[in-house]
Amino acid sequence: MSIKKLSFTMILLYGIVFFSPFLFKPFSRDIMISATTVTYILGAVLMIWLYFKNKKTANTLVEQEAKLTSPVFTLLLGFSGIFIAMIIQAIVFSIETTITGAKPSSENTQNIIAVILANPLFILATTIGGPIMEEFVFRRSLIGLTEAYTGFWISAIISSSLFSVIHQDGHFFVYFFMGFFFAVLYKMTGKIWTSIIAHCGMNTLVVIAQLMLHYGNIELPK
């Protein structure tokens, strides 16, 4: 399978998974959350399988031109990227809320935490399934499809913009710069695992922090 066909396949798969909760609406809330979680994990597993199955024939320009391809750099940049991503998120969030006057909280994150509190199994979707699929789609697939026509940086801007819009959070620049940072990590090593590590790690820390605030009855300053 070519990189073009593989990219479209992954985008289609992501679309099916993304809208899957609507299929489970007729059922109880617990069943809907559990089914959605399983769908997210299966989607991520299928994408990983497709990646390895077509690894020899479907390579992006980023992967062909990367310099820091050693697994050492993948791990180093991936894990350090977790904390850099958190710092970038905090800085952009602060600037954006100061300029726009938007609420100093993420509606998307709060909704996710509410679902996790209702069904802890959903944490697997938000910290593993979701981030893995988003990296394969918004970094590898979208950039892989457009880079030959626009160059990497324009492709990164396009994919990061779509990444932000899909989160429907109202904090466009926060998600945009997060997506752009993950794209840079991908470009540096040519390994999608670099941005996957950073994205999964960041989501995990955010969820843990929010749960600690909830169970500790701690309110953030407004």
Image (cartoon, helix red, strand yellow):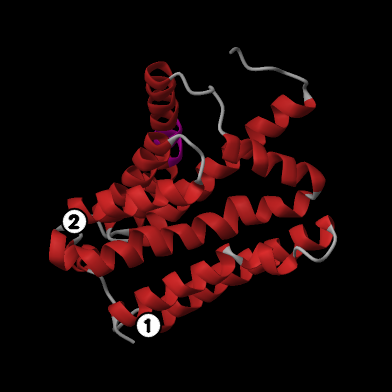
Q: x, y percentage for residue 40?
A: 62, 64
Name the residue located 50 percent from the left edge and 60 percent from the top edge: 132
Name the residue located 66 percent from the left edge and 44 percent from the top edge: 112
**Disc 2 marks which amino acid?**
Phe
| Distance (Cα) linking label 2 and label 1 | 22 Å
Based on the picture, tell me whether residue 90 belongs to the magenta stretch.
Answer: no
Q: Residues within 10 Å of mark 2 (few under 14, many from 20)?
A: some
Is 206 positioned to the left or the right of 157 in the image? right
Q: x, y percentage for residue 7?
A: 36, 74
Residue 114, numbered label: none
Q: How many labels were placed on the picture?
A: 2
User: Where 210 falls versus 200 (above or below)?
Assistant: above
Q: Nearer the viewer, residue 185 or 126?
A: 126
Q: Nearer the viewer, residue 146 or 28?
A: 28
Residue 152, numbered label: 2
Numbered disc in front, either 2 or 1: 2
Secondary structure at badge 1 equals: loop
Q: x, y percentage for residue 70?
A: 29, 59
Residue 58 occupies quadrant: bottom left
Q: Main secondary structure of the magenta part?
A: helix
Secondary structure at badge 2 equals: helix
User: Where 81 falls versus 61 (above or below)?
Assistant: above
Name the residue located 69 percent from the left edge and 17 percent from the top edge: 219
The mark that comes first in sequence, 2 or 1, is 1
Task: Identify the residue under disc 1.
Answer: 54
Is 55 positioned to the left or the right of 43 in the image? left
Q: Nearer the viewer, residue 41 or 96?
A: 96
In which quadrant will I find the N terminus? Answer: bottom left
Which stretch appears magenta?
A: 82-86
**Disc 1 marks which amino acid?**
Asn
